[in-house]
Amino acid sequence: MFEQRLVTYLGARVPLLGGRLHPYVAPEHTPLPVGVYQITTNTRRTHDGHPLVNETVRVDVWAQTFAEVEAVLGELHQAMAAWQDADAQTARIQTEERFYEPAVDLFRGMITCLVCIGG
């Protein structure tokens, strides 16, 4: 449920990816830029008797140029910082990083967010 909401939400707000957001590994020969996401943590707790779930989401962006990585990370940052729907109270950016990956001759950016759901 959360994963589908995440993909739908980002698909509508990160146009530079053109719908190329995949779980774990992008299909071979996917055009760049491309995003790969992981939901790395699912912590359940309660607050005032209401169930809460914290989801940690990491999105890696792969592109031919540093400028493409920066542009997509900018859209991702704005989208995640603004995410608030019926269930998600907050989406807080935890980290943003940028790399050059010489083994594949591509640039990579990574954004990690904590999303609190419920309440």
Image (cartoon, rainbow, N blue to C red):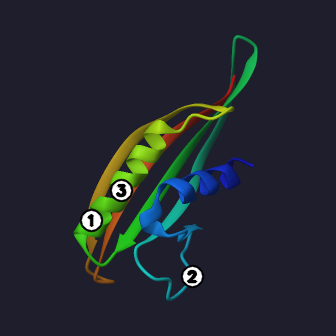
- Amino acid type at mark 3: Leu
SS under mark 1: strand
Determine which quarter of the picture holds residue 54: top right
Residue placed furthest toward the bottom: 29
Q: Which mark is residue 27?
A: 2
Q: Is residue 106 left or right of residue 47?
A: left
Per the model, the C-alpha gap separating discs 2 and 1 is: 21 Å
Which of label 1 and label 3 is nearer to you?
3
Can you say whether 103 is above or below 3 in the image?
Answer: below
SS under mark 2: loop
Q: Nearer the viewer, residue 40 or 86?
A: 86
Q: Nearer the viewer, residue 81 or 13?
A: 13
Find residue 76 and report its horizontal and vertical position in percent.
42, 52
Residue under label 1, please give it.
99
Asked if disc 1 and disc 3 are in contact, CB closer than 8 Å, the reply is no
Which of label 2 and label 3 is nearer to you?
3
Determine which quarter of the picture holds residue 108: bottom left
SS under mark 3: helix
Q: Residue at x 50, y 83 (%)?
A: 30
Q: Could you tell which of marks 2 and 3 lies nearer the N-terminus?
A: 2
